[in-house]
Amino acid sequence: MHVVVIGGGIGGLTTALALHEAGIRATVLERTREIRPLGVGINLQPHAVRELTELGFADELAAIGVPTADMVWVDRSGNPLHREERGTARGYRWPQYSVHRGELQMMLLAAVRERLGPEAVRTGTVFEHVRQNPDGVHVRAIGRETGEVTDTTGDLLVGADGLHSAVRARLHPDEGPLRWSGTMMWRGVTETDAFLTGRTMIHADAGRGARLIAYPIRPGAAGQGRSLTNWVCMVSVAEPQPLDGAAGWNRVGRLEDVLPHFTDWELGWLDVPGMLAGGGELLEYPMVDRDPLPSWGEGRVTLLGDAAHPMYPVGANGASQAIVDARVLAYELATREDPVVALRAYEDKRRAATSAIVLANRRMDRSKPRNPADADGSGDGPAQGIYTKIARTYRNSTGDDVAELNARASLHPPIRKGNTGMTFKPEPTDVTSTYYAAWKVKDFDTLRSVLAETVDFVGPYGSATSADEFRAKIEVASEINTDIVVKKVFSDGPDVLTWFEMHTSVAAPVQVATWSHVVDGKIARQRVAFDPRPITG
């Protein structure tokens, strides 16, 4: 099977990686001439971090992201109005990460080129139209520099081309303009002093239609008392209405348009006017979304990410939902015989969930009090109550349930037969079954012997050269309930390499083992998802 993906953003690249892990060929067509680390900070919610972890990015995410500890609502004087824990502090088995969007995209791009090959992403290629027949799709694109017309054939087309999706426009030509909330947003990144826990996301509301969200995005900076702080200023400037024009997310803004709304803010522990003035280039764009669609695609074509469900960023959920889209899509395609039926099953699962989030984000944006000092409208009610209610309502509306995510089965699909034609050495199911049986009874000597003479790496704690050392590192990881990465490399000669990689959390119901095999520069992978609880010693 060959899937053509339009769009090389976070959703499109994750789709390519998820399809590859399922044994499905993917080609990404991206309109920009060069994919560069643009943008500012974004958040990855635990449900998205889980999917990227199961795709093998646990170490990379920890290297580029700040694990968010809590979310605090404050007024413009810095007084706390509501607080809630985030990520692992709230009970999830996966953290919430605050990351630079560009760094995340470059991480995914490098992985696609490494795993799928350098030609898997074709930049400077503008989608024009798609023609379907009973056996597949014919995708026409134009080279931005040469004007050359190219035709790509595949079995399916996925439109992951963002807010101004050309694929969506082809599928839904009468949809009309974007919906503007009446709020303008200015975003930037500034070096500041660390604030609160050093891993806190703040939402400050001064009333008068001005709000601020800020959070750190550089790992380790808080240890030096510093923070690379991503900030978003939101100012209500009009009534909700259709947007007249485009909504480019990387349009350069002007400081003089936003600073006057925040000059008298004094949080005490964060210099808001100084942060805005010291941020260098800032980006400006309207807060927009679209009404949920009754259907995303037709036949062999579907949508994904912002192309399918653009949403207000107030819930910090857009990129996360695109990542989950990608994994569900790959799972359905790998587990169903008919790819068209698989696309509709994917849409049925994701459309309802993402529509609920789109509408919940609208309600949350509208429910902000005009003046936090009068949050209940009576003049003497506590402001804390309204933010507690907003947070609780949003969680209930979006299915943000800790126990449900922790207990949910993995979306790792079985590998489609005939994917690579390569042979794995040694046979993964035999070794991993022995491994998990030993894990169940904490037989660390057997664990070591399964992985040969030594374990090369027990992440993030280095190598283990004895059973006692291996046991000690596992116990340290268990105490902080972190993911553990175990790697062992086997060499069969200069051009043949096989390695074992296992991602697990001690408390997780599903653990994932991967055997990778490289021959002459080509890589094949087989993943085996296990529930260790039924295994006995």
Image (cartoon, rainbow, N blue to C red):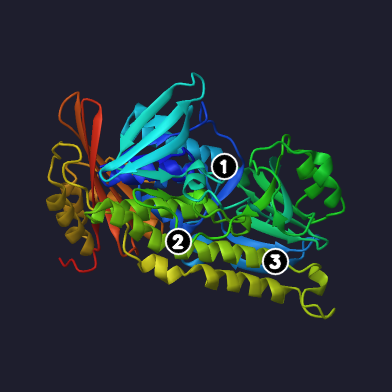
- CB under 8 Å between discs 1 and 3: no
Provide residue 422's location: percent of width, then percent of height.
15, 36
Instruction: Kindly report which numbered mark, 1 or 3, lies closer to the viewer in this rendering.
Output: 3
Find residue 351 and name its label: 2
Q: Is residue 214 or residue 450 the one in the foreground?
A: 214
> Which residue: 66% across, 63% down?
72
Instruction: Kindly report which numbered mark, 3 or 2, lies closer to the viewer in this rendering.
Output: 2
Name which quarter of the figure residue 453 lies in. Answer: top left
> Which residue: 51% across, 41% down?
166
Q: Which of marks 3 and 2 is nearer the N terminus?
A: 2
Dot 1: what SS? strand
Q: Is residue 265 or residue 130 the one in the foreground?
A: 130
Q: Is residue 520 or residue 304 the one in the foreground?
A: 304
Q: Quadrant of the N terminus?
A: top left
Callout 3 amino acid: Arg
Callout 2 amino acid: Arg
Mark 1, residue position: 100
Marks 1 and 3 sit apart, C-alpha to C-alpha, by 28 Å
Dot 3: what SS? helix
Q: Residues within 10 Å of mark 2 (few under 14, many from 20)?
A: many
Q: Is residue 322 positioned above or below 492 on the image?
A: below
- Does residue 332 appear in the picture of this structure? no
Marks 2 and 1 sit apart, C-alpha to C-alpha, by 27 Å
Dot 2: what SS? helix
Provide residue 55's location: percent of width, then percent of height.
35, 47
- CB under 8 Å between discs 2 and 1: no
Outermost residue, top side: 146
Callout 1 amino acid: His
Mark 3, residue position: 366
> Which residue: 46% across, 34% down?
127
Q: Residues within 10 Å of mark 1 (few under 14, many from 20)?
A: many
